[in-house]
Image (cartoon, rainbow, N blue to C red):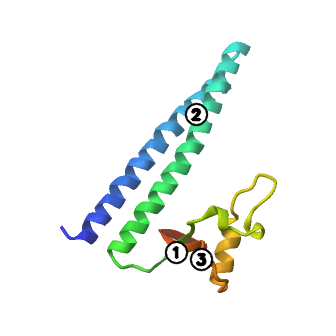
Amino acid sequence: MSHAQEASAKLKADALAGYAALQEIAKAAAAAVKELRQATDPTLAMDAANRASVAILDLAGTAKRVHEEADAALARAMLATETTEIHSTHHSVSLKQNFDVDISDRDAVPDEYWTRPSPYPNRAKIKAAAEAGVEMNWCSVVSSGVSVSRKARK
C-alpha cells in the first residue's frame, strides 16, 4: 500500500470513528429529550432535562474534537497525495502553512511587543513586524506545520 493510500485509509477510519462517536452521543441526547417530553413528574422532567443538557454539552465538545481530528487527517492525506486544493459544491479547501514566533531571549523583547495588563509577548505583532522586515535578533518566525483552510464558495 502506498503512502497516499495509507493516509487515505487512515483519514476514512478516523472520520468514521469520529462520526460514530457523535451519533452515540446524539442518540443519548435524543433519548433524554424524548423522556423530557413524556415526563409528567417535575423531578423526572428535571432529571431528563439535566441529562439532555449534559449530552448536548458532550456533543458540542466531541464535535469540536472530531472536527479538529478530521481536519488534521485531511491535511495529512492532502500532503501525502500532494493535493493542494479540493473544490466541492459549497467549499474550497486548501492547505495553509502555519508559523509561530520562537523567542530566544524574553529579556530582549522591546516594550512595544508586550501586551498589557498581564505582560506576555504579543506574538502576532512580533510576527507581523518580522514579516515586514524589522530586524529582531531575539526571535525568529518558524514553521509550526500546516492546517486546513476552508472557504465558502459563491
Which one is in front, 14 or 123? 123
The residue lying furthest to the right in this view is: 117
Q: CA distance from mark 2 to mark 1?
A: 34 Å
Task: Give the structural element (helix, strand or loop) at label 3.
Answer: loop
* Type of the residue with mark 3: Asn
Q: Residues within 10 Å of mark 2 (few under 14, many from 20)?
A: many
Q: Residues within 10 Å of mark 1 (few under 14, many from 20)?
A: some
The image shows residue 86 at horizontal and vertical percentages of: 46, 77
Residue at x-position 51% and y-position 55% = 67
The image shows residue 69 at horizontal and vertical percentages of: 45, 55
Q: Which residue is mark 1?
A: 96
Q: Quadrant of the N terminus?
A: bottom left
The answer to which of marks 2 and 1 sits earlier in the sequence is 2
Q: Residues within 10 Å of mark 3 (few under 14, many from 20)?
A: few
The image quarter containing residue 121 is bottom right
In the visual, does 77 lie left or right of 65?
left
The image shows residue 18 at horizontal and vertical percentages of: 43, 48
Q: CA distance from mark 2 to mark 3?
A: 50 Å
Residue at x-position 81% and y-position 53% = 117
Question: In this rendering, is residue 142 above or below 51?
Answer: below
Residue at x-position 45% and y-position 58% = 70
The image shows residue 108 at horizontal and vertical percentages of: 66, 67
Q: Which residue is mark 3?
A: 137
Q: Which mark is residue 55?
A: 2
